[in-house]
Image (tube, helix red, strand yellow):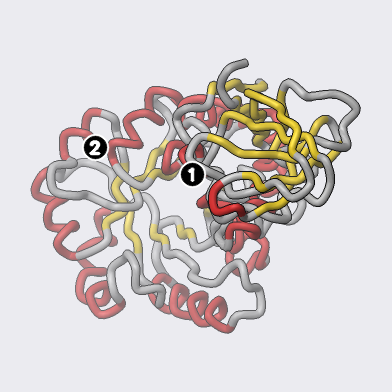
Amino acid sequence: MSTARLTINLYTLASNWQALDAKTSCETGAVVKADAYGLGAGPVSAALAEEGVRNFFVAAAEEGAAVREAVGPDATISVFSGHMEGDSDLLRQHNLTPLLNSSEQFRRHRQALPEHAFGIQLDTGMNRLGIEPADWAALRTEIEPLNPSLVMSHLACADEPDNPMNRHQLRVFRELTDGSAAPRSLAATGGILLGSDYHFDLCRPGIGMYGGQPFAHAKPVVTVDLPVIQVREVEPGESVGYGNSWVARRKSRIATVAAGYADGLHRAIGGGIDAFVADRPCPIVGRISMDLITIDVTDLPEDPERLRILNGHQTVDDLAEAAGTIGYEILTSLGARYSRGYIE
């Protein structure tokens, strides 16, 4: 193995989806935007379709085309960005359902694809995407007779169960949609965990399927193995890496592995993170550079051929915490240089 290897366990991913689905009594879809959070929209979507998922969500129409190829003609694929200028052909050719975000998008959709399915996204306080309450009040009597496939909104603080914003958005969503005949959706992973009040007719988990917080019981989906290029001896007082940021206090063996921040292993991760040989941790030392990471393997009985930086002991959320970011960013940053393998 000359390149770092990313292994995605589709069985575990499906198990995480099943665990989230079991928390609801409604339909459970799946968010596969951003190339399924960097893990491959085709294989991930196909595996979820085999589990019975029939509602998929993507960010843009171009993403939806790839998912359609993976899941076949029958599933519903909804597009969060709605009907953008120039999307009409993609939406029609791949039977994608735009979630319309404004009166302008509604007019565009009605003009370009008058018989084509659509859904509605409402803004309930996040101020990111969605039709605002005043515009919804003006449009509702025009939209609802056209039978939208879904009316949805998105929670801003679902990963903080006690945040009052959750109850506020729930109340606003109910006020805006009570009496509607269309299926409703408010909850992603965090919303599922908030309880049945937030579930409505369809939940749409994302990060929890992929092994990330706030789903504490998620099983790790991703492993990353780093090939060792070289092992060198370092004397006490010698430094390793850029900026002389790590200095050996004892005679040490330092393994240099083929990965770095160009592969989504952020420069800020640094201290406090290990790489593993089986269950044995070996600390990362020195700064992470673009293509290389240095790891202290002094306590191993022999030089390793590879080290694993993501496993059951150290998750994407551990790396994220060390880097001062979130698991979503770690997952979606895993670069194109990895050789990829899937466990079915």
Mark 1 crowd level (few <14, some 14–19, many ≥20, 10 Å Cα): some
- Which percent across, then down, holds residue 144? 28, 61
Q: Which mark is residue 91?
A: 2
- Which element is circle 1 on? helix
Mark 2 crowd level (few <14, some 14–19, many ≥20, 10 Å Cα): many
Q: Is residue 282 left or right of residue 223?
A: right
Vertical relation: 74 (above or below) 22: above
Q: Residue at x 22, y 34 (%)?
A: 90
Q: In this rendered view, identify the residue nearer to me: 173 or 9.
A: 9
- First along the sequence among labels 2 and 1: 2
Kindly identify the amino acid type of the residue bearing the numbered disc 1.
Answer: Thr
Quadrant where the N terminus sits is: top right
Q: Is residue 207 left or right of residue 237?
A: left
Q: Which mark is residue 332?
A: 1
Q: In this rendered view, identify the residue nearer to me: 238 or 119.
A: 238
Mark 2 near mark 1, Cβ–Cβ under 8 Å? no
Kindly identify the amino acid type of the residue bearing the numbered disc 2.
Answer: Leu
Quadrant where the C terminus sits is: top right
